Image: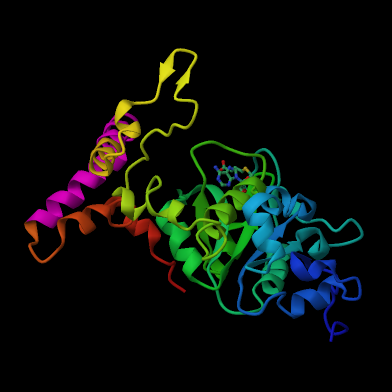
Amino acid sequence: MTGDTPKPEASKSHGRLSISASLRPRELMAEPQVAGAWTASVVTLFPEAFPGILGLSLTGRALAQGLWNLRTIPLRDFGLGKHRNVDDTPAGGGAGMVIRADVMDAALREARQGPPCPVICMSPRGRPLTQARARALAEGPGVTLICGRFEGIDQRVLDAHGVEEISIGDYVLTGGEIAAQVLIDATVRLIPRVLGNQDSLAEESFSIGNRGLLEAPQYTKPAQWEGREIPEVLLSGNHAAISAWRAQQAERLTKERRPDLWRAYEDSLRAASMDPAKDRQLSGASDQSRSYREHDKEPKR
Ligand code: SAH
């Protein structure tokens, strides 16, 4: 079964079945660890960076329980020549190196075995990662992620595979591994049963229950700490008053810190009031913001 492919050890599995000593990585990959579980396949020059932080706490426990699967596809295994080169100098000149299209193509063909799922390249020039995108990904079968290094990746292989580019923010990292872990973490925690208490998803920042706004400040014991008190309303036991306070704080914080989210929220309220068929509150809460909604569509295949 493994003899007909040139890179028999190309894929490494993480999670429940990876502890089985009798199975080789390639065999684990050919047989999804837990059939049907959400799977992240990650093409990377640094497979040892995985599962990394994802192996700890709630995501780690869920990985061990088979609630999701992680496969790494080491790009180096598809490199050329004695030194397994994966990169070359940029066409047109300039600094740094670019990952070759042919090398990345071979790794992607390996990564894309299994049920079809979105192929995403972590990139500072991608569309920003949003909670809504994570939600959509969590509802699908999984994701194939490409971690870039050096100056980036030959555009032709991204075009050929219909790759969507996603950024985790307006700054430049040295590689896509941390960004991929951010995307996987944001997505995996939305898979049912991964969080101990699913209720915590209902009203957090960007959630529908929180109208797509930022979450209100949190407090816990002691009631007095170094002369600072917990806002009185939170100790009142009056649930309606607490809800109103939290809603008002969510609005205040969003207005102050995220005018972009606030504008989108106001727009959705306006749209709802112009369309009597729409429930005002639900529309206001719709997936984080209207302006982000375009970003949330699956890329065309
Ligand atoms: N020359 C590129 C930056 C390359 S950084 C440019 O100017 O746009 C090397 C790799 O790190 C990228 O290929 C990407 O995979 C990853 N990376 C860097 N910043 C990132 C960000 N903000 N979000 C997601 N991935 C990022």
Which residue sits at x=50%, y=65%?
Answer: 138
User: How far across and down, in percent of the image, does residue 176 sit?
Assistant: 64, 48
* Residue nearest the observer in this picture, 174 or 279: 279
User: How far across and down, in percent of the image, does residue 264 sit?
Assistant: 25, 46
Give ligand 1's quarter of the image. Answer: top right
**Relative height, residue 173 to residue 157 (above, below):** above
Can residue 148 be seen? no
Q: Is residue 267 magenta?
A: yes
Which residue sits at x=67%, y=52%?
Answer: 54
The scheme the figure's colours follow is rainbow
Q: Quadrant of residue 62?
A: bottom right
**Relative height, residue 217 to residue 261 (above, below):** above
Image: magenta residue range: 248-273
Q: Quadrant of residue 108?
A: bottom right
**Relative height, residue 213 to residue 31 (above, below):** above
Q: Residue furthest bottom?
A: 1
Can residue 179 be seen? yes
* Residue nearest the observer in this picture, 156 or 230: 230
